[in-house]
Every structure is written in C-alpha cells, then in structure tokens.
Image (spheres, helix red, strand yellow):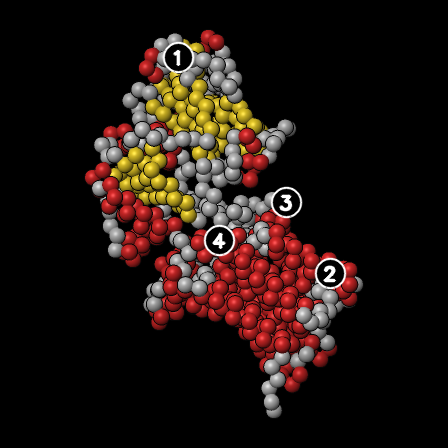
Amino acid sequence: MKLKIRQEHILLLLILVLGTILRTYKLQDIPFTHDELSVVFRSGYTSFSELITDGIMPDVHPAGVQVFMNYWVAVFGDSEVAVKFPFILFGILSIFLVYRLGKDWFGEDVGLASAAFVSAMEYMIMHSQTARPYASGLFFSLLMVYAWQRYLFSPGKRQYLWLTAYVVASAICAYNHYFSLMFAAITAATGIFFINRRQILPYLIGCLSIFILFIPHLRIFFFQFRQKGVGGWLGKPDNDYIFDYLGYVFQYSPYILVIVAGIIIAGIISGESRKLLRNRFFYISLAWFFIPFLTAFFYSRYVNAVLQLRVMIFFFPFLLFLITGNLPALKKPFRIILPMLICLVVSLSLILERRYYKLFYKSCYQEIIVETDLSIKEVGKDNCLVFIDSHKRISEYYYDRLDIQFDHYRMDGFENMAELTKLLGRSNAKFVSLGVDSRSELVLPSIILDHYPNMVKKIDYQGGNYYLFSKDDSTPYSNKFSSTNNFNTEEDHWSHGVDSLYTDSAGISGSTAYFLGNSHEFGPTFSVPLNVFADHKNDLIDVSVSVRNLDSLNNGIIVLSLRGKEELVVWRSAFLSDYDPLTGEWYTAHHTFRPGPNFKNPDLELQVYVWNKEKERFLIDDFRVRTRPGNPLLFGLTEKL
C-alpha cells in the first residue's frame, strides 16, 4: 500500500519542526529556574523511604515527578540539558496530541490552528523547558483524553487497549500534579454522560482501577493537603483574574488578539457558531476549561490560594478548541495561510514582544554572582563591600558551578537594619556591590544610597537586580521625584503640622526638627496623586526620616498608604526601631514600596507619615519621599513588558 502524503501532513510537520526549534534553541544555555533547582536538590536519594520522607513530603506536589527525577538524575546526571530533556520531549509530543484531538473533535483546520498556537506560545515553550510537572502533566492529560474519547466514541477492535491506555494515563496524571489529578476526576465523571450500556461495567472498573493505583499515594496526599502549601505566599486572585490569564497566554500581543478575534468573528459571520453549538465536544471543552478554573478561583478566594497561571496549562488546549472550533470550513489557500500565519505571528511576538530568549535564558541567581565577581576585579576586593541577598543554597550551587569565590555578607546574617547601617557607616571601602533576587527587601538600595550616593551600575534581570554603588558623590544618583521636608520652610505636598511642635536648633546640624510626644500621634503628612508620582508599576517609592529618641524606646512607625475616594486600598509600614542603633544619637529609618498595577489609578492618593503609635517622645528631621526607577523586567515572564 502506497503512503499518500497530504498537504495537512506537511503543515503538521512544519508546525512540529517549529515547536522543536523554539524549545531546543541554544539548549545548553537554558538555565535552571528556582523550582528546578529545588527538584535537583531533593534528588540523589538511594533509599526510597528517604526520598518520600525528605524529598516529597515537604513539597506541595504529588510524588510522581520527584520520584522520576530522582532516578533520571542518577542515570543521566544533573546538567541542565539532562534534567530538562524529558520535559522538552513532552512539550513537543503535546503539539501532536493537540492536533489529533482538535482534528477528531472539530476538523483538520481546527487541529492545525490549535497545534500552531501550542507550538510557538511562550506559555507552552517555557513550561516545556522547565523540569516541573506542567509539560509532563499536559502530555499525559492529552493522552488520557485521547484514549478516553477513542474508547467512548470510536473504540473499534482495540477498545480494551484504549481503556487500558486511559487508565494508565489517568493514574500518571494523578501522580503528576493535583490539578492534573482533578482533571482525571473530571474526565472520568464526564464519561458517565456519554457511555453506552455495553461499556458501563468496563468503564467503571477502569475508573476504580485508577483510584486503586492512587491508593499508595493517599498518605502523602492527606499530609500535603493539611499543610498550608502555596497559600502561605500566593495571593488570592482578583475578580478580573480571567482577563489577566488571557492576556498572559496570548502574550499581551495585539497582533495575536487580532487573529483570535478574527477566528471568532469569522465563525459568527459564516454561521459556524450555530454548528458548533450542536457539537458535543464544544460542551466538553467548555466544561473542561471552566469547571477547573472556577473551582480553583473560588477555592483560592475563600479557602486557600492555589490558582496560578501555570496550573491551568492542563486545561488550556480546551480553551483553544473553544476559539478555533469556531473556524468556518477553509479552502485553499486559507487552510495553509492560517496555521502558518499563527506560527509566524506568535513566534515573532515570543522573540520580539516578549523577549523570551533574552529574559528566560538569564538566571538572576547566576548573573548576580558573575557581575559581582567582575566588579570586584574592576575596583579591587579591598575597595568593595559585597552583599548578596538571594537563595543561599542556589548561590552556593553557582559558586561551585562557576568556580567563583569572594568574601561577602548575606542579608540574613544581620539581626536588623541597624546592623547593616552601622557597617555601611564605618566602612572604608569606596564601593558597595549588591545582588538581590525578587524576594529581597526592596529597601536595601535606598539604605546604601544614604552612604554611597552614586549608583554606578544597575542591571535588571527577570527575577532580580545587580547594583554597584560608589562613595564618590560628584555624580550622585538622580531620583525621578524627590521631596524633602526639613521643617525649616513650607514644602509642596506636605501638611503643615502643629506650630508649637517645630523645635528650633534641635534638628540635625542645629536646624529645625519636629517633636512628637505624649499628645501627638501623627506627624506632618506627605500627599500626592499616585499617578503623577510613579511612571511604572515596578517603580520604587523610597521613604526615609531621621529620628532622635527622647525616651529609651521608640515604637514609632513609618506609614505609606494608598487611599481611594472612599476607602483605604493599601497600607504598608516600617518600624523605626529596626534602624535604631541604641546610641541616643540621630539615625535614619527607611521604607520602600512598589505601587504595582495601582500606579495608573487617578483616584489613588499616596500618603506618607510617621505614626507615634505608643505616644512616645522623639524628634524627626529630613523627612524624604522619592521615586527611583524599578526593574521593568522583574516579572517579565508573566506580566506585560
């Protein structure tokens, strides 16, 4: 029998080749992410019981991927290429399965269009290049669904083979991720609505078999379920979370959105939408995307936050089917042009709009160590005070990996900010080097600028920053906006305060200071509309105030708030006592805030003041509020650039 190669096969091959190239581009240069290094660090166990107790129980994911990686690393090593390879393969195979499902459910054109999206989307590529349970979960979820639909709707002579494949893939989903476990449960329940009388008993036995296969994991499941998990750091989703998700998966690109809108409009105009509503797979796709989404959304809002952009990857293909299933029947040349156009536009958006390879291929953990080493060599180790504030074990991993060693301080080695300030004040070094990740205290550069006013370097990375500061104040750092109240004259944006509390000659260098005492709870307030103060959501608002205690203790607080027309939207604080050297002399306290997406809101007013919460006695002077450019790339892999 002669094999006939059809036009659709060539298109599919081109889509698969593109997806492979985009996932393997400079394969040896793809760095580990924080979560991947966590996987590597929890590998290497020779005892299975230790692997479960020490490598899996402390995590918030099922055992499957960690068990697999433990033995995979033992055989193939822990290089980036070795660790990532299986997941890249899962990502490539998922393109093909999306095509097959789209073709079987809605037709050839839908299969090709959906596969074209999946081949080039940042959402799919990044998780294919990351050794976490997302690419594997996507592949086995699609395999589960493919076997499920073959058994229910076109079993042929291999019905028990398809049922077996469905059971095995479902069990793997259960061990892979708790959201892919949820998907396996939803898929099994969906089958009840479509099963025929002859299939009921085998199908129910199959579903029971999935549960039996998961029984060994139940102890781990209940242990992890009782833990707080990601809810300890993950915020609850806002009401418009679905729009954030859609913006992210379609790469915040107006060009991609035009294609998506064009597909939907074309289906409505052609009448394809009415035909779509008669297709049972439309309702299956609708349920399989929105039931998990709404379940995770409301659980996150009212119980424990679990909804993240990445956990919806298992259900995303069915959202694509809802969109591309609307396609009218295409004729040449449009059935060739559309998938190729999707590939072209999404790929260009990935490279040019999202700058994916420039952002993802730079690990801030590695880069701040490399830049620190370069700066030390440039200015001399005796002239440079070095601080690193990133994940300790990851830093140690890169010190060994890069064979780089230098003397430095870690921020977790300071009991409070007063110790850091004291070190900066007594140092004879001409430069300060600072490397930070996204979890570092935002206030650190502001503290250093008080002692080293010239910012020589500022390098932005996805997930972190590198800074080099100098004592040379001939070219001091210029803030985007700065206002200082030294209580000598009236200043714009500041409330006046109480006249009797202005104390002549009591301030720094004999200037005027402001007294807060037993009957005065609040000092003068700085107020300004937020949208004229910050230009970007990642800009940083630095607040500092000089303080001198007149009592032995000072529990005063620097308060920064965002107030709307009718309510308080944000309230942030910093304790003066964290900066108190306990010498009885003047000291400077700091606070830094990132406005985030609120920065454009014209109805929000920024207010800054000192709250004398315990009605203690102290003086304040040189109360300063300023903005400096933040890191526009900090969350660049998930947010709009």
Residue 507 location (% of width, % of height): 36, 14
Among numbered discs 1 and 2, the one appearing first in the sequence? 2
Residue holding disc 4: 355
- As displayed, is residue 30 above or below residue 239? below
Q: Amino acid at mark 3?
A: Asn
Q: Amino acid at mark 1?
A: Thr
Q: Residue at x 49, y 29 (%)?
A: 560
Residue 246 location (% of width, % of height): 61, 53
Among numbered discs 3 and 4, the one appearing first in the sequence? 3
Residue 260 location (% of width, % of height): 66, 57
Classify residue 418 as left or right of residue 638. left
Residue 512, label in figure: 1
Label 3 SS: loop
- As displayed, is residue 577 above or below residue 409? above
**Residue 32 is drawn in which quadrant?**
bottom left
Residue holding disc 2: 266
Asked if the residue under mark 2 is in contact with the one under mark 1, i.e. CB atoms within 8 Å, the reply is no
Residue 239, label in figure: 3
Classify residue 301 as left or right of residue 405. right
Front residue of this view, candidates 110 and 293: 110
Q: Amino acid at mark 4?
A: Arg
Front residue of this view, candidates 58 and 310: 310
Among numbered discs 4 and 2, the one appearing first in the sequence? 2
Q: Residues within 10 Å of mark 1 (few under 14, many from 20)?
A: many
Q: Marks 4 and 2, Cα distance to the nearest angstrom?
A: 31 Å
Label 1 SS: loop
Mark 4 or 1: the one toward you: 4
Q: Residues within 10 Å of mark 3 (few under 14, many from 20)?
A: few
Classify residue 376 as left or right of residue 235. left
Label 2 SS: helix
